[in-house]
């Protein structure tokens, strides 16, 4: 009897070990992989246009003007009067896991006439005055660079903290009508107008902020960003809301249309009296761009 039991046990073991029998057994349930970031670097390049308006005040050589001009005003005053409007803007980001490095470059050269300007005041130490401001021409470059780190996710939203620096370069000329009493200290005369020239003005600000990246649906994305800082300026802040639609993917490259709104404020000043320069300005307006991601 014991031999018979042994034979049956051996036959059972053989049957269970055979491939046919193993195929009939249910496969073990696979464990889900832990969420992981895509290995290696990914890159995004986004040339864009910022239809910016200007609201604030500008002081050059101690003479101040209030500025209130929409993007339409700027285009009319520049291109409509035979001037040149130059705006070069590029946003870029490289991401590896939770870490991202970003940069943003803005270059502008614009003209405003008296419709968007109002003479406000002169700095202490300047005797006499000039008449109303008749035009303002300025060149400006803003270069931003920094890093962001993802701190968490909630549903389809990822949240980053970010920090970096923003470099400003400006060069402005403000023209005034010549009034009856004029102190021409620091001014030049050209075509019957007194012109206050700033020369090159440069400063650097540090900033810190937060960002949310939201996948609204397949191919639909939303980015919200805010930062605040100071350094060369008394205060600077920026706010951005941008929607992106992925309209094409080919050869590992995704192309997206970008629509948003951006606001950038800075309060900067230097010097006193006839050497005073100040830029207390909010730039804001719609953003239109094309994003290439690979």
Image (tube, helix red, strand yellow):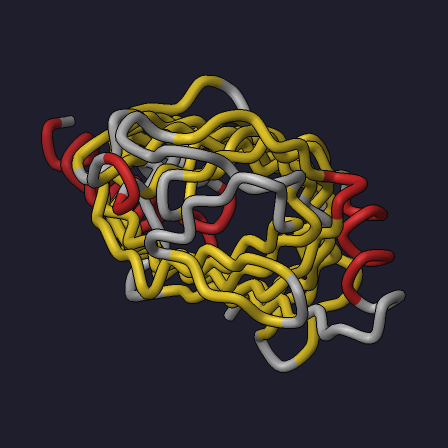
Q: Would you identify the image quadrant in which residue 105 lies?
A: bottom left
- The front one of 29 and 101 is 101
Q: Position of residue 135 (x, y in %)?
A: 67, 53
Q: What residue appears at the point 20 percent right and 35 percent down from the top-left corner? A: 4
Q: Nearer the viewer, residue 246 or 146?
A: 146
Question: What residue do we see at 30% from left, 26% from top?
Answer: 124
| Residue appearing at x 72%, y 74% in the figure | 84
Asked if residue 253 shows in the view, the reply is yes
Residue 99 position, x and y percent, is 25, 47
Residue 164 is left or right of residue 15, and the answer is left
**Image location (x, y in percent) of residue 51:** 72, 49
Position of residue 27 relative to residue 169, above or below, is: above
Q: Quadrant of the N terminus?
A: top left
Q: Is residue 21 above or below residue 140?
A: above
Residue shown at 29% from the left, 48% from the top? 166
Residue at the bottom extreme, as displayed: 251
Pick the residue in front: 220 or 81. 81
Horizontally, residue 127 falls left or right of residue 193, namely: left
Q: Position of residue 41 (x, y in %)?
A: 32, 65
């Amino acid at each position: 009897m014991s031999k018979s039991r042994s034979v049956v046990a051996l036959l059972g073991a053989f049957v269970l070990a055979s491939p046919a029998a193993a195929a009939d057994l249910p496969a073990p349930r696979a464990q889900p992989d832990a969420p992981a970031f895509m290995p290696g670097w990914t890159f995004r390049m986004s040339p864009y246009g910022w239809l910016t308006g200007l609201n604030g005040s500008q002081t050059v050589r101690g003479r101040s003007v209030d500025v209130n001009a929409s993007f339409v005003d700027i285009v009319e005053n520049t291109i409509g009067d035979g001037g040149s409007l130059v705006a070069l803007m590029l946003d870029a980001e490289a991401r590896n896991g939770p870490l991202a490095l970003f940069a943003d470059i803005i270059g502008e050269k614009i003209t405003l006439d008296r419709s968007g300007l109002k003479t406000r005041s002169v700095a202490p130490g300047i005797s006499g005055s000039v008449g109303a401001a008749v035009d303002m021409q300025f060149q400006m470059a803003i270069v931003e660079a920094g890093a962001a780190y993802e701190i968490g996710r909630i549903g389809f939203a990822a949240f980053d903290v970010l920090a970096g620096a923003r470099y400003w370069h400006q060069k402005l000329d403000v023209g005034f009508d010549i009034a009856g009493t004029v102190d021409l200290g620091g001014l030049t005369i050209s075509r019957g107008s007194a012109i206050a020239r700033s020369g090159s003005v440069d400063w650097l600000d540090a900033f810190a902020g937060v960002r949310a990246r939201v996948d609204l649906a397949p191919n639909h994305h939303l980015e919200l960003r805010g930062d605040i800082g100071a350094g060369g300026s008394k205060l600077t802040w920026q706010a951005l809301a941008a929607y992106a639609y992925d309209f094409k993917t080919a050869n590992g490259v995704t192309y997206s249309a970008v629509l948003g709104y951006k606001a950038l404020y800075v309060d900067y000043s230097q010097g006193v009296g006839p050497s005073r320069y100040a830029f207390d300005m909010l730039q804001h307006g719609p953003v239109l761009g094309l994003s290439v991601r690979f």
